[in-house]
Each structure stands twice: as structure tokens, then as C-alpha cells.
Image (spheres, rainbow, N blue to C red):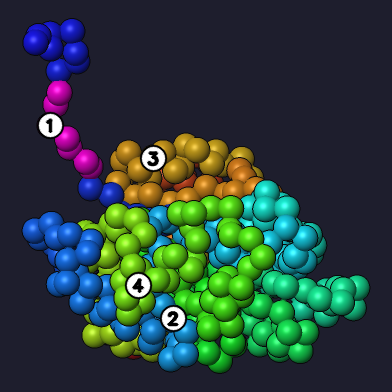
């Protein structure tokens, strides 16, 4: 059969990128290498040993000894939807604490399930005020679930969970937490905060490719799923069925993404070799260095103070500077990717990520040096070398 009418197939040439956006981050070379090994069946006894090891490696990263830990086949949004789909039934009341784009994504999912969705929205760029949740609890006899984003990727805000956890326990509600950007870069502390369902993603601080959503599930949450009045609407994202595959009996559910799980195993080993506290400190120190450099350029930070998220630093785009031109120049001329604003922040901020393998001083210097060259060409005057000098000075003092 002739293929002359088909376009000529060229060798794939993926350009090297320094990924300094909100995700994915650069994958660790050891992770990528681990994923090139021989293929193995998803029910092979040797692969069962691998998923058992992954489950155990996830526990210290999530900060849990009590909860079941596994990885859902899909990105962080799959972890989000699996939790809502499995924990909520039509008519159940869920209170959603929203102060950013990904809280709104939860809202969209929950409304499609027919749940009684109570939306509590607060100002973007600031933590969610716990007093709003406290007052809302007074309006309900029974709240099945409370949701909150611990690290809001769209705004760069880190949410303290102390008071929210206390409130959900007082009202006997399940607590669901989005840790997509925090896992591996912050203390998630699932046991401390008695989180019933916590989900994340592999492509950020875990320094793995996209494709898996690690989760931690309490026994109480699993019992809630098992004792539903009707089955979850999604078979694929049924947490009970997924947990049965990852559990002792390894009951077949779907074809697991074998290579991704092997890559996750390596990524978790790397985290524990570095040490969780050391890794958290690295993310914080590099974030502060980046902030010092950006402010030395005269750029204004969106979030300041203790609730700023080390992994994502949003900055306001200077007046008169074209958002797309800067991001395009960074990508095409320097091979550096940063993120655009989402939702209320669309066209107003740049989001700069330092996560996992991408969180390194040399990456900070590369970005600041590029901005020092790009911004003056767009009419934004800065002193050459000021950004790099600001970051260097901070790092010198912190060592």
C-alpha cells in the first residue's frame, strides 16, 4: 500500500526547556532513566511488589501512618474528581472553601454530581478566612464534606489547615485537601490535620512526568465510599475499586500505567534520600532568593508574608509590558517557560515556579538574567545585573 499521500514523517526533536512555570517541572534524570526499563504486566507478582513499595514510600511524604496511600491513573484533576465522585452522593452537602482557580474547578465537578454545593469564595491572593467557614457551619445540620486547596497554584497562596481541620472534626465532616503543588515541597501532615482525602500530582515537586495522582485516604473515607446508597457515577474513578487493586488482594481494576508508577517509585526514593525537611528548606530558600531578585528588578509580588507559597511566585505584570511578548521571548530565545495568569489573574500576572528538580539557584539566575535583557526592550527600565545581584546576595547571606 502506497503512503505517498501522507506527509513525510520526521524524527521527533523535542527542544530542551527549563520549566519554571506552574507545572510540569523538569523531571529528575533518574526518574526518566527508570522509566526506560523493560515493560512488565500490571498483575505480574514483581510489579505487585513495586506498587506495594510505592504505597509505603508515599506515607512519609504525605505525613501519614494511618491512611491508605496509592496513585490514581491520571493527573491531579483525576485525583480531585475521584475524591468528589466517590465521597459525595446526590443531595450530600459539601462546603467548598474557594480563593483561587482550582477551588473553582472542584465546584464545577461537585455540581455535576448533584450534590448540595455550598460555595464560600474569598479574595484571590490571600488565605481563605476560616471565620467564613465557621459561620457557614451554623446553617447546616450535617455537612458531609469540606474541601480546601492547601497550595493554590493560581495565586501562590499557602493555606494553613489548623483551624479548618479543627472545625471539620467538631462538625463530624470529612476533609478533602488539594495538595497538588504542596506534596514534596511543603509539610502536608495528613495525620496531624486528620485529612480524610488528600490528592496530589506527580509533575510538580515530585519531579516526575505527568500522569499519576498520588492520594492518601482515611479509613473513615473508605468506609464512606463502601457504604454508599448507590455506586459512584464513575466506574474508572471509584476509589473503592482502585483501593482494592492497590490493597493486599490486588484485585484487577484497569490497566495501570506501569512506567509512570516505576518512575514515581524512583522519584519518591530521591525525596527520601534528600530528606523531606531538607527538601522543604530547599524550596523555601530558593523561593526567597527568587523573590529578592524579582523585587530588585522593581517587580511587585502578588503574595507576601508567611502565607506565600514557595513553589509558585506570582508577580504583577508591569504597566505597559505585554504579557505574551515576554513569555514568548523567554521560551523562544532562552528556552525558559513561565506561567500565565488564570481566572481573575489572567493577563495580570506571571507565575514563576520553582518545584522539585527545577528548584535550583542556577535556574533562578538564568531567569533573572533573561528578564534583565527582555524587559528594557519593552520600555521597562532596570539596572542590568540588579536581579541576579539581589538573588545572589540573599543566597550568600543564607548559607
- Residue designated by label 4: 246
Residue 10 belongs to magenta span = yes
The answer for how far apart the CA atoms under marks 2 and 4 are is 9 Å
The answer for how far apart the CA atoms under marks 3 and 4 are is 45 Å
Q: Secondary structure at mark 3?
A: helix
Residue at image location 75% in from the left, 65% down from the top: 92
The numbered mark, 1 or 2, whose residue comes first in the sequence reads 1
The numbered mark, 2 or 4, whose residue comes first in the sequence reads 2
Residue at image location 50% in from the left, 77% down from the top: 217
Front: mark 1 or 2? 2
- Residue designated by label 3: 329
- In the drawing, what numbered circle is on residue 68? 2
Range of magenta residues: 9-15
**Dominant SS in magenta:** loop
- In the drawing, what numbered circle is on residue 205? none
The percent coordinates of residue 35 (x first, y second) are: 17, 60
Front: mark 3 or 4? 4
Q: Are marks 3 and 4 in contact (CB under 8 Å)?
A: no
- Residue designated by label 1: 11
Q: Are marks 2 and 4 in contact (CB under 8 Å)?
A: yes
Residue 310 seen in render: no
The numbered mark, 3 or 1, whose residue comes first in the sequence reads 1
The percent coordinates of residue 142 (x first, y second) are: 81, 76
Q: Nearer the viewer, residue 204 or 74?
A: 74
Q: Residues within 10 Å of mark 2 (few under 14, many from 20)?
A: many
Amino acid at each position: 500500500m502506497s503512503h505517498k499521500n501522507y506527509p513525510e514523517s520526521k524524527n521527533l526533536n523535542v527542544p530542551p526547556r527549563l520549566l519554571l512555570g506552574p507545572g510540569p517541572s523538569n523531571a529528575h534524570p533518574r526518574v526518566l532513566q527508570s522509566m526506560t526499563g523493560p515493560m512488565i504486566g500490571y498483575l505480574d507478582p514483581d510489579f505487585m511488589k513495586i506498587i506495594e513499595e510505592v504505597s509505603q514510600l508515599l506515607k512519609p511524604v504525605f505525613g501519614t501512618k494511618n491512611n491508605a496511600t496509592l496513585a490514581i491513573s491520571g493527573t491531579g484533576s483525576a485525583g480531585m474528581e475521584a475524591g468528589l465522585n466517590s465521597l459525595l452522593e446526590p443531595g450530600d452537602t459539601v462546603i467548598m472553601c474557594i480563593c483561587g482557580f482550582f477551588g473553582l474547578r472542584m465546584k464545577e465537578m461537585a455540581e455535576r454530581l448533584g450534590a448540595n454545593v455550598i460555595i464560600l469564595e474569598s479574595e484571590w491572593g490571600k488565605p481563605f478566612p476560616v471565620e467564613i467557614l465557621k459561620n457557614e457551619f451554623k446553617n447546616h445540620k450535617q455537612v458531609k464534606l469540606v474541601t480546601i486547596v492547601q497550595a493554590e497554584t493560581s495565586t501562590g497562596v499557602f493555606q494553613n489547615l489548623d483551624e479548618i481541620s479543627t472545625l471539620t472534626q467538631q462538625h463530624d465532616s470529612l476533609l478533602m485537601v488539594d495538595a497538588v503543588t504542596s506534596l514534596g515541597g511543603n509539610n502536608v501532615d495528613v495525620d496531624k490535620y486528620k485529612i480524610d482525602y488528600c490528592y496530589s500530582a506527580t509533575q510538580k515537586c515530585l519531579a516526575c512526568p505527568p500522569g499519576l495522582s498520588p492520594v492518601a485516604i482515611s479509613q473513615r473515607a473508605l468506609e464512606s465510599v463502601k457504604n454508599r446508597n448507590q455506586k459512584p457515577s464513575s466506574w474508572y474513578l471509584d476509589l473503592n475499586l482502585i483501593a482494592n487493586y492497590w490493597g493486599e488482594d490486588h484485585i484487577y481494576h484497569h490497566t495501570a500505567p506501569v512506567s509512570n508508577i516505576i518512575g514515581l517509585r524512583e522519584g519518591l526514593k530521591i525525596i527520601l534520600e534528600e530528606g523531606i525537611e531538607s527538601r522543604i528548606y530547599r524550596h523555601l530558600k530558593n523561593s526567597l532568593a527568587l523573590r529578592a531578585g524579582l523585587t530588585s528588578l522593581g517587580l511587585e509580588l502578588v503574595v507576601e508574608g508567611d502565607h506565600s507559597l514557595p513553589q509558585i511566585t506570582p508577580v504583577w505584570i508591569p504597566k505597559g509590558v505585554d504579557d505574551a511578548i515576554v513569555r514568548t521571548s523567554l521560551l523562544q530565545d532562552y528556552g525558559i517557560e513561565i506561567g500565565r495568569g488564570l481566572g481573575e489573574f489572567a493577563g495580570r500576572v506571571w507565575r514563576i515556579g520553582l518545584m522539585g528538580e527545577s528548584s535550583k539557584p542556577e535556574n533562578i539566575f538564568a531567569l533573572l538574567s533573561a528578564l534583565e535583557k527582555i524587559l528594557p526592550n519593552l520600555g521597562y527600565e532596570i539596572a542590568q545585573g540588579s536581579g541576579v545581584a539581589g538573588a545572589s546576595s540573599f543566597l550568600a547571606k543564607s548559607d
